């Protein structure tokens, strides 16, 4: 990724707005952008979803196939997440091998799904030590206007929620992939002491610190990731958790819909 | 590499009545839908559905060519990157360019290099990105057709749009626009791209087995189809700019929101403003 | 609006044959076999014996004497590099400023991230650009905010003889500088800035149809509850 210089003037403008409780696109501090989910977008994939969070647009495909388990986890299916920040999505994305940003994005989304047991890899075993289901989650950024973490995570969850395990490959009937949890990630950015939810691109560029809190349908915390070079105090982190619970509830409803 | 179990070898790709497996006749195109200006960040873009193909094309440029040693002091580079998303094909494809994608990128770049007015933008690059989201054969034609629309949407000066289509041979019959099964089990495939106004062929590839006469038949099918495709491309562009005009009218006539902030004292009158340049 | 039915300007597409009877090929067109064709998406206009295609999209291509708003992205001992939202980076030489800048002292006057308003002094055939902020009305901008619009829409934002910007200023009282490169700087009270930014977005999203000034006037009159004093001018007499 190449950096784009944000002008001092715009940096001050956004900070000034934040200091008086406003944001450049008119949202409240706790307001995420509009989320639009289109499931089953790609027929060739076992599951897929195109997700738009404001102007950030991400397409996620889930491919499931039969394969061999890893030797150290003979009874578990394999889950692998990767992200491509393709150059068409932003003038700052270059072609080439995955950048650290793409890798961090893939790993954070992966953790949210794996550690929360959204997909229980023990249930993806066909024949222990021999055959398991291999699941690939591929995140494809299409248009970048900030907060890929959340957009990609909603995309992955939406794609999983409509995925079908192609059991016809082993002589059985295809069945919907069972999801055990519905973790929703909510990212906030800190701008000069003010914390705003779902930062757009301008806000992301000037943020001092960023925090992603993933909560499940019971309000329990499933994952956290702090980013950028600034810091949060404990009260701000607790507030971010409450925001994730509150905002997560509304967004979960949209993703759970067909 | 594609799964072939589901088509029994005895099945005819085209029956005695001239009907293909998907119900088309030998000279019928799959349904095509095109939309221009679908992405916000790119300078120009287009989304295209062609049968079961789904492709997205975006253009950035002209912009400074990087790395600098590749810059041409006399003209713009035209660089296309064709890529298939991992989930676009039945067997997941590893991310990143493979040799096939690199070759397709090259021939598509060359197709556009002859229509873009490259001398107008020395030292820059016009970057074209084609992303195949769902594949069902004919993706390079779909991608090129979409990229043409994206180039026009980006305001890149060109001599004409470029329209692209493929024909081939299935069950001994020369047929238009092969889908994936037809391409896998047919006898030949021949993608081409044409500058509709002048008839110049700017892309041509062929694999399989055709007699010279069959090749002529295939080209006739493709060139006629290209005319239809050209109209779809032009229509997509016209609709985009008409839609934009309508949206602006709706916006202007909407009720302004209630006042939020109290009125502040207006700032002091500004010093000399720079002279506004009148429109030419 | 006035009585005449809105005439959707016809959009031409690259390769379209233009009716260039007795006219010469102007900007956005090309000549082939003695006939004139459109090279870009836009609308057709005639000017001084030329037929032009006025672009509806496209990046900013620098022209001499254009006023632009740029961002400092890099500096050297005797110059700065300015991003003017164009394929071509624009160097600003220390001599082209109102200050006496000593060699190596450039950072004292302009930092990376500063915004300046200036003009393009020259563009050569290789599209190498020279900028200047030396004149009195140019310099560093502070406060306010920058909005980006398509450079193709700048003439509509300015309006014939500046009547569109005058209309916006009359109601909103904002300070506003319009760069030919599609960058707009505005500053003012919260309400004024809100309405000005809204109008600017409407203009950016607008298509080639005439009547835009009327629409903008209607919006501002409704927003402020009073009539405009800036005189009405038809903007569809062959020019945007």
Image (cartoon, rainbow, N blue to C red):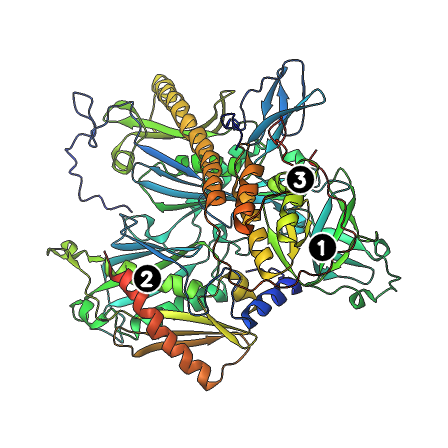
Residues under labels 1 and 2: Cα distance?
Answer: 40 Å
Which badge, 3 or 1, comes first in the chain's sequence?
A: 1
Left or right: C24 as drawn, with respect to C3? right
Q: Nearer the viewer, residue B56 or C197?
A: C197
Callout 1: SS: strand
Q: Nearer the viewer, residue A20 or A251?
A: A20
Callout 3: SS: helix
Q: Nearer the viewer, residue B83 or A249?
A: A249
Residue density around tag 1, few if under 14, some if 14–19, many if 20 or more, within 10 Å: many
* Same-chain status of marks 3 and 1: yes
Residues under labels 2 and 3: Cα distance?
Answer: 50 Å
In the rendered image, which quarter is residue A239 located in? bottom left
* Same-chain status of marks 1 and 2: no
Q: Is residue B78 visible?
A: yes
Q: Which mark is residue B100?
A: none
Q: Which mark is residue C163?
A: 3
Residue density around tag 2, few if under 14, some if 14–19, many if 20 or more, within 10 Å: many
Q: Position of residue B258 (x, y in %)?
A: 48, 57
Give the residue at mark 1: C82
Give the residue at mark 2: A156
Contact between labelled residues 2 and 1, with CB atoms less than 8 Å apart: no
Q: Position of residue C19 (x, y in %)?
A: 58, 17
The residue drawn where x is 66% and y is 46% is: C181
* Same-chain status of marks 2 and 3: no
Q: Position of residue B133 (x, y in %)?
A: 36, 47
In the rendered image, which quarter is residue A249 located in? bottom left
> Which one is in front in this view, the residue at disc 1 or the one at disc 2?
1
The residue drawn where x is 16% and y is 54% is: A169
What is the chain identity of the residue bearing mark 1?
C
């Amino acid at each position: 990724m190449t950096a784009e210089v944000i002008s001092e003037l715009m940096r001050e403008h956004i900070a000034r707005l934040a200091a008086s409780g406003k944001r450049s696109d008119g949202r409240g501090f706790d307001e995420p952008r509009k989320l639009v989910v289109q499931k089953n977008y790609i027929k060739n994939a076992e599951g897929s979803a195109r997700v738009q969070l404001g102007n950030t647009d991400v397409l996620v495909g889930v491919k499931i196939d039969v394969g061999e388990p890893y030797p150290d986890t003979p009874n578990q299916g394999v889950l692998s997440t990767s992200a491509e920040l393709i150059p068409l999505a932003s003038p700052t994305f270059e072609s080439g091998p995955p950048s650290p940003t793409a890798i961090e994005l893939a790993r954070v989304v992966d953790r949210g799904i794996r550690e929360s047991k959204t997909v229980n890899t023990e249930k993806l075993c066909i024949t222990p030590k021999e055959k398991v289901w291999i699941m690939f989650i591929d995140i494809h950024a299409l248009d970048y206007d900030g907060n890929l973490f959340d957009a990609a995570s909603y995309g992955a969850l939406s794609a999983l929620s409509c995925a079908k395990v192609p059991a016809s490959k082993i002589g059985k009937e295809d069945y919907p992939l069972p999801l055990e949890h519905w973790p929703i990630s909510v990212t906030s950015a800190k701008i000069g002491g003010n914390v705003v939810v779902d930062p757009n691109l301008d806000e992301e560029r000037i943020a001092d610190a960023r925090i992603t809190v993933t909560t499940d349908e019971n309000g329990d915390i499933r994952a956290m990731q702090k980013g950028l070079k600034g810091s949060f105090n404990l009260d701000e982190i607790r507030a971010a958790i409450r925001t994730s619970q509150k905002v997560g509830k509304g967004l979960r409803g949209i993703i759970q819909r067909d | 590499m594609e799964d072939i179990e589901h088509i029994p070898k005895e099945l005819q790709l085209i029956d005695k009545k001239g009907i293909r497996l998907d119900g088309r006749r030998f000279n019928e195109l799959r349904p095509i839908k095109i939309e221009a200006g679908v992405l916000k960040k790119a300078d120009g873009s287009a989304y295209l559905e062609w049968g079961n193909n789904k492709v997205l094309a975006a253009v950035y440029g002209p912009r400074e060519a990087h790395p600098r040693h590749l810059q041409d002091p006399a003209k713009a580079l035209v660089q296309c990157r064709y890529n298939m998303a991992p989930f676009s094909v039945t067997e997941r494809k590893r991310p990143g360019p493979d040799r096939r994608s690199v070759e397709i990128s090259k021939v598509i770049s060359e197709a556009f290099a002859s229509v873009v007015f490259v001398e107008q933008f020395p030292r820059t690059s016009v970057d074209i990105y084609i992303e195949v989201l769902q594949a069902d054969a004919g993706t390079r034609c779909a991608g090129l057709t979409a990229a043409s629309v994206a180039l026009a949407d980006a305001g890149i000066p060109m001599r004409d749009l470029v329209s692209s289509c493929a024909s081939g041979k299935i069950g001994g019959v020369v047929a238009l626009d092969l889908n994936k099964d037809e391409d896998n089990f047919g006898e030949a495939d021949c993608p081409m791209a044409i500058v509709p106004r002048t008839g110049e062929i700017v892309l041509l590839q062929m694999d399989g087995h055709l007699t010279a006469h069959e090749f002529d038949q295939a080209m006739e099918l493709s060139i006629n189809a290209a005319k239809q495709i050209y109209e779809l491309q032009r229509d997509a562009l016209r609709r985009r700019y008409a839609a934009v005009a309508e949206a602006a009218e709706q916006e202007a006539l909407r009720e302004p929101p209630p006042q939020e902030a109290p009125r502040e004292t207006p700032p002091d009158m500004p010093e000399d403003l720079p002279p506004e340049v009148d429109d030419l | 609006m006035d009585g005449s039915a809105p005439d959707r300007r016809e959009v031409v597409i690259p390769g379209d044959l233009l009716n260039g009877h007795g006219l010469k090929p102007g900007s956005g067109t090309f000549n082939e076999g003695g006939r004139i064709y459109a090279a870009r998406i836009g609308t057709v206009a005639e000017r001084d014996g030329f037929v032009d295609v006025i672009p509806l999209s496209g990046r900013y291509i620098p022209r001499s004497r254009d006023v632009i708003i740029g961002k400092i992205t890099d500096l050297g001992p005797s110059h700065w590099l300015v991003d003017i939202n164009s394929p071509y980076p624009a160097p600003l030489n220390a001599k082209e400023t109102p200050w006496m800048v000593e060699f190596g002292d450039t950072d004292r006057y302009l930092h990376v991230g500063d915004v300046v308003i200036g003009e393009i002094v020259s563009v050569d055939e290789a599209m190498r650009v020279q900028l200047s902020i030396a004149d009195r009305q140019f310099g560093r901008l502070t406060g306010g905010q920058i909005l980006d619009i398509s450079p193709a829409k700048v003439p509509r934002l300015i309006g014939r003889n500046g009547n569109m910007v005058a209309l916006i200023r009359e109601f909103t009282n904002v300070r506003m500088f319009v760069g030919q490169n599609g960058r707009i700087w505005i500053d003012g009270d919260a309400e004024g800035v809100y309405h000005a930014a809204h109008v600017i977005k409407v203009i950016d999203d607008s298509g080639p149809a005439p009547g835009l000034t009327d629409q903008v006037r209607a919006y501002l009159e409704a927003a402020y509850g009073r009539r405009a004093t800036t005189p009405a001018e038809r903007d569809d007499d062959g020019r945007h």
